[in-house]
Amino acid sequence: MPVRARAAPPRSPRPPGQRTSDDFNAIDPNLVVDGQGRWWLSFGSFWSGLKMIQIDPATGKRTGGAFHSSAGRGGGAIEAPTIFQRCAHYYLFVSFDLCCRGADSIYRVMVGRSTSVTGPYVDRNGVAMTAGGGTEVLAGHGSVNGPGHQDVFADTDNDILAYHYYADDGRSLLGINWLGWDSSGWPYVH
């Protein structure tokens, strides 16, 4: 009996249950509570970029239908939004480029800021993150390959940047660094 090649079943690029009319990828959620106590969920990757919706704290469900675009690269690699409030600004940390390729990963952590949780977020040069802007905070160096998919939080004595990266042998590792802030209010890694 001849062996017939069978085509693999088509793979959906969307998570299960996501509408085919959506132009965003509903992954990598991050919840932030703004200075007025309102809850916001940021999420997304690639396609039309990162989005934000308001959440009802009593139900955990979306309020209204408004989506706010917070960052994008014209369909290019961007994901893992994390919003951190410091002083008068909200900082949107994201990961640019590609992860999950072991030591060949080129992920890097970028940031923009805004005085409003919903944006617009701009980088140090004033370029909107919705137009591909972003100020680099951390990139590969030495045997730290593809750092990204970050979280930022305040500890008792310092702000912290946590992320994953790959060693030269391809192992995935956890990185933790203190964040410093320059005189203009932009973060840097210690």
Image (cartoon, rainbow, N blue to C red):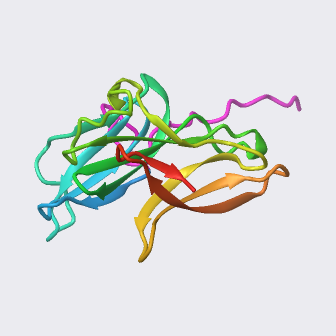
Q: In x, y percent, where is residue 85? A: 29, 57
The residue shown at (78%, 49%) is 143
Residue 171 occupies quadrant = bottom right
Total numbered circles: 0
**In this picture, which residue range is highlighted in magenta?**
1-27
In this view, the residue in front, 87 or 129, is 87
- Quarter holding the C terminus is bottom right
- Quarter holding the N terminus is top right
Q: Does the magenta stretch include residue 12?
A: yes
Q: In x, y percent, where is residue 160? A: 48, 64
Residue 75 occupies quadrant = top left
In this view, the residue in front, 124 or 68, is 124
33 sits left or right of 82 in the view: left
Question: Which residue is situated farthest in the bottom direction here?
Answer: 156
Q: Is residue 160 magenta?
A: no
In the image, residue 39 above or below residue 103: below
Instruction: Examine the rendering and report whether any part of residue 15 can be seen.
Output: no
In this view, the residue in front, 59 or 181, is 181
The residue shown at (71%, 43%) is 141
Q: In x, y percent, where is residue 182? A: 42, 48
The residue shown at (72%, 42%) is 101
The residue shown at (78%, 29%) is 5
182 sits left or right of 103 in the view: left
Of helix, strand and loop, which mostly describes the magenta segment? loop
Instruction: Examine the rendering and report whether any part of residue 128 can be seen.
Output: yes
In the image, residue 165 above or below residue 159: above
